[in-house]
Image (cartoon, rainbow, N blue to C red):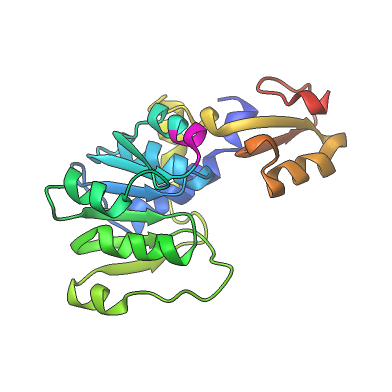
Amino acid sequence: MSDAEATLVVTAGTSMYGLTELGGLVAGESVVVIGPGPIGLLAVAVAKALGASPVILTGTRNKRLAIGKELGADRVINIAEEDAVEVVKQLTGGVGADYVVECAGTEATVNQAIHMTNRGGKICLAAFPHDPVTTDLAHLVKNNIYIYGIRGEGRSATRRAMALMAEKRFDATKIHTHTFALDDLPTALRYARDRVEDAIKVVVTSRQASAPTNAAAK
C-alpha cells in the first residue's frame, strides 16, 4: 500500500465504524449514503465491500457521483434532478433503506434521511451541521428509527478497513484528488478547506509527489 493510499485508511475506518461497530450492517441490507464527500464516498465503497445491496448515493455534484459509481454505488441520485426519498422508496420496494449514512449535515438532508429510512432502520449522522436542525422527530418515534452519530473511527474499524484496502476490495485512491509538497502546506489547506478544483482528499508529502498531482503545486 502506498503512503498516499495509507492516508485514506482513517477515512475508510470512520465509514466502517459507523456501518459495522455501531450500525451492525449485515450483507444484503440496503444502504443510502447522503453526500459524496470523503467519508460518504468511502462509505459507499465499504458498504459494497461488506455486501450491502443496493448501495445508493445522493448528492449534487455529478463528478463526485460518478466516482461513487466507480466505488460500487448501484444507483446515484442527483437531488437537484430527482426526489431522493421517492427514488429510494422505489428501489427498496416502497419500504425505504435499512441504513442511511448522512454525510451532508444540512436540515434538508437530515430530514431526507429520516423519511427514506425503513421502519426499524438506522441513521448514522456523520456530518457536523453548522446550525441547529429541526427534524421530524415524530416520524422517527412512530417508525422506531434509530439514530446515532460518529465523529471518527473506533475500535478495530481502521484495521479492518485497511485489510479491505490491502486486498483491493475497493480503490480508495479514487478520492485522492490532489498532492502537494510540504512546502506548499498553506495551499494544500486552502484546497481542502475551500474545495478548490473540487478537491476531495488532499495529501501533503515530504517526498517526491506522485500522481494525482495538482498542477498548481508544481
**Picture residue at 41% right of the left edge, 53% below the top:** 17
Q: Quadrant of residue 99?
A: bottom left
Query: Over which residues does the magenta segment extend?
Result: 61-65
**Picture residue at 49% right of the left edge, 54% below the top:** 153
Q: Residue 213, relative to residue 105: is it above or below?
A: above
Residue 30 in the image, given as x and y percentages of width and height: 23, 46
Q: Residue 27, relative to residue 63: is it above or below?
A: below
Residue 45 in the image, given as x and y percentages of width and height: 39, 36
Left or right position of 132 against 122: right
**Residue 5 painted magenta:** no
Q: Quadrant of residue 213?
A: top right
- In the displayed orientation, state which residue is furthest to the left: 93
Which of 73/11 is in front?
A: 73
- In the displayed orientation, state which residue is furthest to the right: 183
Residue 208 in the image, given as x and y percentages of width and height: 78, 21
How many marks are shown on the rendered structure?
0
Residue 205 in the image, given as x and y percentages of width and height: 76, 32
Res. 40 in view = yes
Question: Which quadrant would the C terminus be assigned to in this image?
Answer: top right
Which of 107/4 is in front?
A: 107
Res. 207 in view = no
Question: Which quadrant would the N terminus be assigned to in this image?
Answer: top right
**Picture residue at 29% right of the left edge, 40% below the top:** 55
Left or right position of 181 against 194: right
**Picture residue at 49% right of the left edge, 63% below the top:** 106
Left or right position of 173 against 140: right
Of helix, strand and loop, which mostly describes the magenta segment?
helix
